[in-house]
Amino acid sequence: MKHEELLVKPWSVLVNNLKELPYVMKVVVDEGGTRPIWHAKDGNQENFVMAWPKEPLLRAGIIVGGEAEGKLEPKAIFPFMEGYPNTLRIETTYAWKNGLEGEVGCFAGESEQILWFYDPLFFRDHKIDLTEGIEQTFYLSGLCLGLRRALLDEITVTSGPYYEVHAEKWLKENPDKTRLDVPALKVDIQGKRLLAPTDTASEYQARVVVEEVEEFVFGPKGGEKIYRFVSTFGDKENIRILMFVPAKACQKGYVPKAGDEVDMIFWLQGRVVDINPEDVTQEPVQ
């Protein structure tokens, strides 16, 4: 599992050109705001998140930092997404070199598969509590990097843990056969919700059934069309993710509709829930 300490892929589906990011950062600094819950101090050092625009569920965010009474400078820029609360058990964390951003690895329910996600408020959340073994509630959201209408209703499995279980059972039922005789495992995936990690932390392949779709526009320069829907995963559908799908990430102009089955790759983001219910007002930075 590799950790890519760059957000090239997420930004590539949200802006026409990565060279626009300095302009996006300027817009956030000039017109964006912050919330007290997005702040954290470490000695004389203060770091906080600013976001623009004020209301939408998908915004541009930046981390601003510096001495509390001194000059504050932008340190990082990221897509900032709101999500659904999920209670997860923390297994491990990975701090990025800038000491501000990071990734968190958790378990959901009884799953033995670590769920990694990027945490834009890592500098704050590790002060709240990211201790291994505890349960913590995170907002989870996904940014789709590629999406298409599902092509297959059945997959063929020839290796891996599911195949091993199948092979053991088949050999018991056919004692006169050898391992070489074991047929491939055919798995019906129609209507299923499947989630599998890629070799990059916080990045996943998935198959989902699209629920109700909403659309809006993101960005300061005319904007990119974004589709939004909810995705659920897990044996008990105990992982609930608010998914954002840029139109440019959809194959050949495909438009997702409620009820469609889709294959996609997405980037997962999470942060500890904003624990002060009254702290919901986003104010400009003076």
Image: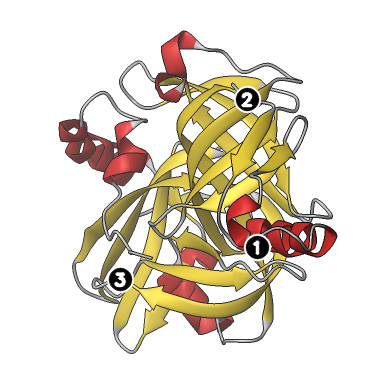
- 125, 275: nearer the viewer: 125
State which quadrant residue 194 falls in. top right
Say which quadrant the C terminus sits in: bottom left
Q: Which residue is mark 1?
A: 164
Callout 1 amino acid? Glu
Residue bearing mark 2 = 152
Residue 271 in percent (x, y) is at: 55, 62
Tell which tag, 1 or 2, sits nearer the viewer.
1
The secondary structure type at the circle numbered 1 is helix
Cα separation, mark 3 vs mark 2, equals 38 Å
Residue at the spot of label 3: 96
Classify mark 3: residues with Cα within 10 Å, few (<14), some (14-19) or many (20+).
some
| Few, some or many residues within 10 Å of mark 2 (<14, 14–19, 20+) | few
Between 61 and 279, the residue placed more toward the observer is 61
Instruction: Give the left or right position of residue 8, taking residue 247 as reference.
Output: left
Q: Tell which circle, 3 or 1, labels the residue nearer the N-terminal end.
A: 3
Q: Nearer the viewer, mark 3 or mark 2?
A: 2
**Residue 284 seen in render:** no
Q: Residue at x 32, y 41 (%)?
A: 9
